[in-house]
Image (tube, grey):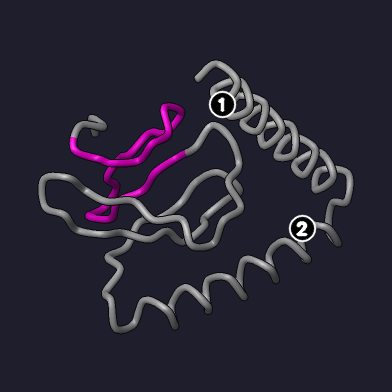
Amino acid sequence: MPQAGWNLKFSHLMVFRLKKKWYFKLSSIISNPLFMVQHQATNNIFTRLRVTSNLFYLFPAAVKQNTYELEEIRKKEELLEALKAEVNPKLYELELEVHEMVMEHIRRKKKKKKVSS
């Protein structure tokens, strides 16, 4: 699926459709449970449900049920993180390290932009 029409602000993102469901894959881990995407052509808002650490299933975010659904997703993600830490602590530590490196890179990039402007 081409990325045209998706307002995502991430260059390292791939959106695709599988069995009538939208998915997107990130090359880095984003831990924000409120991460949402918007399709520009239809203005439909989608939120994501984590499938693996960097693969997400997109589902329509209805305004009325959105808050409850996101809270449920957040709770399940916290449980998943706890289980991952229990099952394979070394892999979990590595994931956290990589995530922190990505976040540090983003912070440095923002600082450079502020200094140059």
Q: Is residue 104 above or below residue 64?
A: above
Could you say where residue 14 lies in the image, as x and y percent from the top left?
38, 33
Could you say where residue 41 lies in the image, as x and y percent from the top left?
11, 45
Residue visible at 55% across and 44% down in the picture: 54
| Residue nearest the viewer, comparing 1 with 19 | 1
| Residue nearest the viewer, comparing 60 with 43 | 43
Residue visible at 74% across and 34% down in the picture: 98
Residue visible at 84% across and 51% down in the picture: 88
Q: Main secondary structure of the magenta part?
A: strand
**Residue range corresponding to the magenta coloring:** 5-25
Q: Look at label 1 and name its amino acid.
A: Lys
In the image, is residue 22 part of the stretch drawn in magenta? yes
Mark 1 or mark 2, earlier in chain: 2
SS assignment at label 1 = helix
Residue denoted by label 1: 114
| Residue nearest the viewer, comparing 28 with 18 | 28
Badge 2, how many Cα within 10 Å: few under 14, some, many 20+? Answer: some
Which of the 4 image quadrants contains residue 94?
A: top right
User: How many numbered circles does the render carry?
Assistant: 2
Which of the 4 image quadrants contains residue 61?
A: bottom left
- Residue 84 has which mark? 2
- Residue 87 has which mark? none
Q: State the separation of the CA atoms marked 1 and 2.
A: 37 Å
In the image, is residue 53 part of the stretch drawn in magenta? no
